[in-house]
Image (tube, helix red, strand yellow):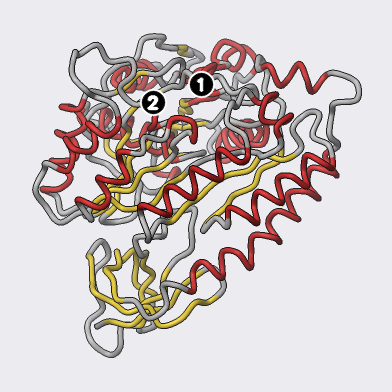
Amino acid sequence: MPQKTFYIENLGCAKNQVDGEALATVLEDSGWLPVRDAAEASLIIVNTCGFIDAAKKESVGVLLEFRRLYPHKKILAAGCLAQRYGKELFAALPEADGVFGNRDPGRVAGIALSLSVAGNGNARELLLPEVYGSLPVRKRLFSVPGSVYIKAAEGCDNRCAFCAIPLIRGGLKSRSLSDIRAEIEIFIDRGTREFNIIAQDLGSYGKDLKTGTKTELPGLLRGILSLPGDYRLRLLYIHPEHFPAEILKLCAEDRRLLPYFDLPFQHASPAVLRAMGRRAGMEENLRLIETIRGEAKEAVIRSTFLVGFPGETEEDFQALLDFQRRAAFDWLGCFTYSPEEGTPAEELHRRKGLRVSRKTALARKKLVEETQIPITEKRLERFTGQRMELLVEEQVQGENLCLARAWFQAPEVDGLTVLHTGEGSPPAAGSMIQAKIIRRNNFDMEAVLV
């Protein structure tokens, strides 16, 4: 029997990447062989994203392109889009041989086997698990060497008016502290030095667990930090209204917990925040930022803004710009509103007089981004001259250079540090090295070995 081979095309966010790594692990454990090129695979998995309209279109487009390139291969649509619109995709997209949801990666081996034994026939498979299955300890990683995402929870109970995540991934379901610790311990033994703890909202971690003990975010972090080793933890995605101030004390107690805080404020106008389902206003959010920077002097704060939300006026937008300047975020991402089916904001979007034109939304996004450039550049200047550990990501071929990241640079979303290595042997990808930051270059830094 020919070797069963698979290729996974991951689309979307870090949480989707973790799901893709879980799928790969299950398939390998079931005798499938991963390949680096889709042309060599007998099964192609498109791990789709369904968060915003552009991501949905990209997911379908990628799947159709694979079908065009490989008309005789088996293609499986998996991930968020598959979970939310599984039946519709199955009916409307015959180019996909199978559709598999994102809630129980352990069952992917069954649908993959069904597709493989179907040969060149027309048999198709649809599997949309509703109950969450456990996340296997991942063997196949798609992240850069030395760094890994650790999923602390799945789903979300916040129900922000614009967000489809609860419709895609369901309500909050936290992983147990023991499972998270066990997974991290395995990666520590493999030499992993950076752990990026992710969830839709880390601040809500543990609220669904009925253990009788304190299992919310501070307790989770204490449990992780009790593991020995020279590693660093970065927290990604904490709803500002659920920020536990206790973690600032933990950052001071254990420097392995980085003072890096990803807080998606989304907006600042009282009217827009109310329509979004956010309770905290601009001044309250500014006080939170002041508290963080007051207690964690080195704190780096990343946020995201959403412009073009239904009903957003020019006055609302000016309030957002005022908040942006006063908050002086280290890093900031800006997105334009996309109406998501089944969300309360979609109903607002349909109302006459509330819709913000695409042209206006894009112009506002551009202005936010232009306003942020000097803010981020100024914030980054404080690191010039400092000595710190860098995580090496890759060597630059033909140059005495490596691409690396400092603690204040999260993977994929922030800038990089260009490391000048000199004439000696360059440090290996995935290693931590001591370096000195010598200058800023736009949003990137430059450093030399020390």
Q: Which residue is mark 2?
A: 204
SS class, disc 2:
helix
Residue 447 lies in quadrant: bottom left
Left or right: residue 375 versus residue 287 is right
Q: Are marks 2 and 1 in contact (CB under 8 Å)?
A: yes
Q: Which mark is residue 158?
A: 1
Depicted 104 relative to depicted 440: above or below:
above
- Residue with the most extreme bottom position: 423
Separation of marks 2 and 1 at Cα, in angstroms: 9 Å
- Pick the residue in front: 166 or 142: 166
Residue at the (73%, 20%) spot, across then down:
346
Residue 193, can we see it? yes
Residue at the (42%, 78%) spot, across then down:
384
Left or right: residue 328 versus residue 388 is right
Image location (x, y in percent) of residue 276: 66, 26
Left or right: residue 295 versus residue 352 is left
Residue at the (40%, 18%) spot, across then down:
172
Image location (x, y in percent) of residue 106: 28, 20
Q: Amino acid at mark 2?
A: Ser
Mark 1 is surrounded, within 10 Å at the Cα level, by few (under 14), some (14 to 19) or many (20 or more) other residues, namely some
